[in-house]
Each structure stands twice: as structure tokens, then as C-alpha cells.
Image (cartoon, rainbow, N blue to C red):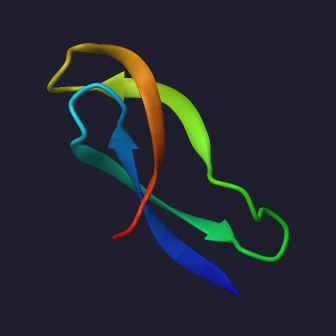
Amino acid sequence: MRDLIAMACDGCKRRNYTTSKNKKRQTEKFAIKKFCPSCRSHTLHKEAKV
């Protein structure tokens, strides 16, 4: 039921975080503001394939 997803930075496109998501409850793409170590700032991280 839960799928593993990667979180990619919107600025540098690097995959910094991994998490899981319930595909039945959350059908749209997941996005959240998180800290990017390579950009050294808080940027938007969007769902990407693992």
C-alpha cells in the first residue's frame, strides 16, 4: 500500500530525502519545504522516483 519515494530539491534537482506515501489516500504529487544541504537553504522538495 505504501510506496517509497524520493524528495528532490526544486533548485538543484538533487535527491536529498526519502519517505513513503500512501498512494490510495494521497494521489497528487507530494511537495514540502525542507533544508537542502547542497543549496544551503530551505527550498521546495518535490516527489521523484527512487
Tally of marks: 0
Q: Residue furthest bottom?
A: 1
Q: Residue 6 location, x and y as percent?
A: 39, 59
Q: Is residue 9 above or below residue 48?
A: above
Q: Residue 8 location, x and y as percent?
A: 35, 45
Residue 7 appears left or right of 3: left
Q: Is residue 23 above or below residue 7?
A: below
Q: Residue at x 78, y 62 (%)?
A: 26
Q: Residue at x 21, y 43 (%)?
A: 14
Along the line of sight, the residue nearer the viewer: 9 or 34: 9
Residue 33 appears left or right of 42: right
Residue 7 appears left or right of 21: left
Q: Residue 16 location, x and y as percent?
A: 28, 45
Q: Is residue 48 above or below residue 38?
A: below
On the rendered image, what quadrant is the N terminus found in?
bottom right
Q: Residue 20 location, x and y as percent?
A: 56, 67
Q: Residue furthest left?
A: 38
Residue 18 appears left or right of 1: left
| Residue 38: quadrant of the picture | top left
Q: Is residue 47 above or below residue 5?
A: above
Q: Residue at x 76, y 65 (%)?
A: 27
On the rendered image, what quadrant is the C terminus found in?
bottom left
Q: Residue furthest right?
A: 25
Q: Residue at x 57, y 34 (%)?
A: 32
